[in-house]
Amino acid sequence: MQHFLIYIDPGSGNYLLQLIVAAALGAGFVVKTWWWRIKSFFHKKKDDPKKNL
C-alpha cells in the first residue's frame, strides 16, 4: 500500500480560490445574459405613439 502526502501551498490555495470565484462570476454572467435574452423574446415592446408623429 502506498501513502501519498498531499500538500497545497498558499499560492496554490489562492489560485484555486481565484478559479472558483472566477467560475462563479462567469456562470452568473452567462445566466444573466441568457435570462435577458429569454425575457426579451417573450416581452414584446408596445409601439410608442409619440414615435409615429
Image (spheres, rainbow, N blue to C red):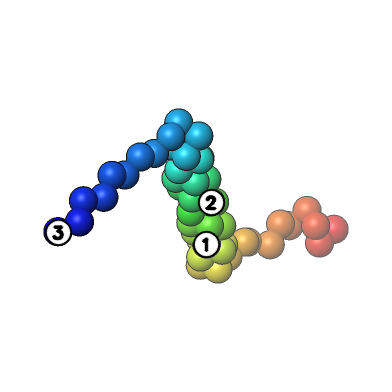
Q: In the image shown, does 21 or 27 lie closer to the viewer?
A: 21
Q: Residues within 10 Å of mark 1 (few under 14, many from 20)?
A: few
Q: Quadrant of the N terminus?
A: bottom left
The image shows residue 13 at horizontal and vertical percentages of 43, 37
Q: Nearer the viewer, mark 3 or mark 1?
A: 3
Residue that numbered label 2 is attached to: 26
Q: Is residue 28 visible?
A: no
Tell me, yes or no, whether the two marked residues, 2 and 3, touch with CB atoms within 8 Å: no
In the displayed structure, would residue 52 be above or below residue 16?
below
Secondary structure under badge 2?
helix
Labels 3 and 1: the sequence-earlier one: 3
Labels 2 and 3: the sequence-earlier one: 3
Q: Is 30 left, or right, of 46 in this rendering?
A: left
Residue that numbered label 1 is attached to: 34
Which of the 4 image quadrants contains residue 7?
top left
Residue that numbered label 3 is attached to: 1
Labels 1 and 2: the sequence-earlier one: 2
Residue at (43% x, 34% y) in the render: 9
Q: Nearer the viewer, mark 2 or mark 3?
A: 3
In the displayed structure, would residue 4 be above or below residue 11?
below
Furthest residue toward bottom: 41
What's the distance in space between the residues labelled 2 and 3, CA to CA? 41 Å
The image shows residue 29 at horizontal and vertical percentages of 54, 51
The image shows residue 47 at horizontal and vertical percentages of 68, 62
Furthest residue toward right: 53
What's the distance in space between the residues labelled 3 and 1, CA to CA? 50 Å
Q: Residues within 10 Å of mark 2 (few under 14, many from 20)?
A: few
Q: In the image shown, does 23 or 9 lie closer to the viewer?
A: 9
Q: Nearer the viewer, mark 1 or mark 2?
A: 2
